């Protein structure tokens, strides 16, 4: 358990630092209202989790330390949106499209409502 937590912490720390650096580079060249840096981080995170999970599945390593380090840790630190994307694709691939669309709708609608509520609570 401790080893798993250390792998997640290491990957998460690296992912968080890379997220910050990605944002710094993008914002250096793009300065506007639209949150392009966050969009790019989320899309790159989705691409990375797809590649990593594909490789882990191909090599039958989905329950290995590599998953904790790269998927839960690195991708989780870089963006949790990548996990959201992967989980929805997994639901769709396993013929649970109704659950996938419910998860998508609930995450977006309830997530936005929770942000609004949090902002309202501290006012």
Image (tube, rainbow, N blue to C red):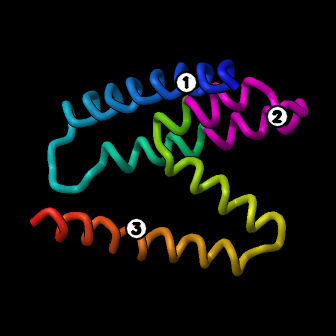
Local crowd size for mark 3, using a 10 Å CA cut-off: few (<14), some (14–19), many (≥20): few
> Could you tell me which residue is drawn at 47 percent across and 34 percent down?
77
- For the C terminus, the quadrant is bottom left
How far from the left and from the top, in percent, is residue 52?
70, 34
The alpha-carbon separation of the residues under discs 1 and 2 comes to: 16 Å
Residue in view at x 17 percent, y 70 percent: 120
What residue does disc 1 label? 11
At label 1, counting other C-alpha atoms closer than 10 Å, the crowd grade (few under 14, some 14-19, many 20 or more) is many
Residue 88, given in percent of the width and then of the height, sits at 66, 62
Which residue is label 2 attached to?
63
Q: Decide: is 101 above or below 74.
A: below
Circle 3 sits in a helix, a strand or a loop, which is it?
helix
Of pointers 1 and 2, the one earlier in the residue sequence:
1
Residue 8 appears in which quarter of the rendering? top right
| Circle on res. 111 | 3
Residue 3 or residue 15, whichever sits in front: 3
Task: Give SS at disc 1.
Answer: helix
Magenta region includes residue 72:
yes
Q: Earlier in the sequence, mark 2 or mark 3?
A: 2
Q: For residue 99: magenta?
A: no
What's the residue at 41%, 25% (across, down)?
18
- Which residue ends up furthest to the left in the rendered image? 123
x and y, in percent, of residue 105 in the image:
51, 76
Q: Find the distance from the CA under tag 2 to the CA under tag 3.
A: 29 Å
Judging depth in this view, the residue of 84 and 40 nearest the camera is 84
Q: Compare marks 1 and 3 and give the one earlier in the sequence.
A: 1
Q: Is residue 76 above or below residue 114?
A: above
Point out the stretch of residues depicted in magenta.
Answer: 49-73
Q: Is residue 73 above or below residue 112?
A: above
């Amino acid at each position: 358990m401790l080893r798993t937590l250390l792998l997640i912490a290491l990957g998460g720390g690296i992912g968080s630092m890379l997220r910050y650096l990605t944002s710094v580079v993008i914002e250096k060249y793009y300065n506007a209202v639209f949150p392009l840096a966050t969009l790019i981080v989320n899309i790159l995170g989705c691409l990375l989790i797809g590649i990593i999970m594909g490789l882990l599945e191909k090599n039958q390593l989905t329950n290995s330390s590599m998953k904790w380090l790269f998927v839960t840790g690195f991708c989780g630190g870089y963006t949790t949106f990548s996990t959201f994307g992967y989980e929805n694709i997994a639901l769709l691939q396993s013929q649970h499209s109704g659950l996938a669309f419910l998860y998508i709708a609930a995450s977006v609608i309830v997530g936005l409502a929770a942000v609004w509520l949090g902002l309202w609570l501290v006012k």
